[in-house]
Image (cartoon, rainbow, N blue to C red):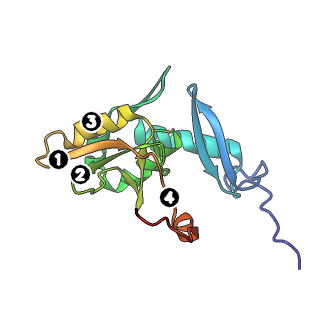
Amino acid sequence: MKAPKMIESCKHCHRKPAGEAKEISFLYEGAEVTVFKNGLICKDCLIEKWKEGFKAHTQTFVSVSEAGFQVDWAAYFQFISEYPTKGSLVNDFLQEIGVLSRRAQGNWELVTSDATNLNPRAYLILLYFVRKEDAIEFARTQYGDSVYSWKIHRVSEVITKKEVMEEVELPLPV
């Protein structure tokens, strides 16, 4: 049985080879961006489409400086309130520019006193702040006037289900 044939030309420009599906990184105004490229589009078309989408959806609250990407969280919340169906898409862009991450360990989360997580989400996936400063500004902007208690902390260790289930002998309490 033959392996399925890879898409040969980009479905967007129809000129360049689409190539394999993989994560790619590139610079946007001097700051690094990492996106997933499927096997249907070439790298050049993906970068152009990404730039167009990024400008269309984040130009009012994301800027690029020497320190990298900066988010104006007040403007972010204004955008989300005006375009509530764009929230997950915008949060995807914030992941691609390294402001948010799906990875918990080493990143920051905002939780209430009863451990309800207040971090942003992309679709149903909980996201974590890569930089402490973004977590603080997000919390101040969105929850500064709330009546309930909340805190920000760095997730220092994550133990997966697989790791837990592989643990056969647990030490007995003394």
Please give the label number shown on residue 112: 2
Q: Which residue of the protein is positioned furthest toward the bottom in this rendering?
A: 1
Task: Give the CA separation, mark 1 to mark 3.
Answer: 20 Å
First in residue order: circle 4 vs circle 3: 3
Q: CA distance from mark 1 to mark 4?
A: 27 Å
Label 3: which residue?
A: 74
Disc 3, SS: helix
Q: Which amino acid is tagged 1?
A: Ser
Q: Which mark is residue 159?
A: 4
Q: Mark 1 and 4 residues: CB-CB less than 8 Å, in contact?
A: no
Disc 3 from disc 2: Cα separation = 20 Å
Residue 5 in the image: above or below residue 106: below
Q: Do the residues bearing badges 1 and 2 touch, measured as CB atoms within 8 Å? A: yes
Q: Give the secondary structure at mark 4.
A: loop
Label 2 crowd (10 A; few <14 / some 14-19 / many >=20): few
Mark 1 vs 3: CB contact within 8 A: no
Decide which of tag 4 and tag 2 comes sooner along the chain.
2
Mark 1 or mark 2: whose residue is earlier in sequence = 2
N-term-proximal mark, 3 vs 2: 3
Q: Say left or right for 58 vs 75.
A: right
Q: Quadrant of residue 137?
A: top left
Q: Is residue 126 left or right of residue 39?
A: left
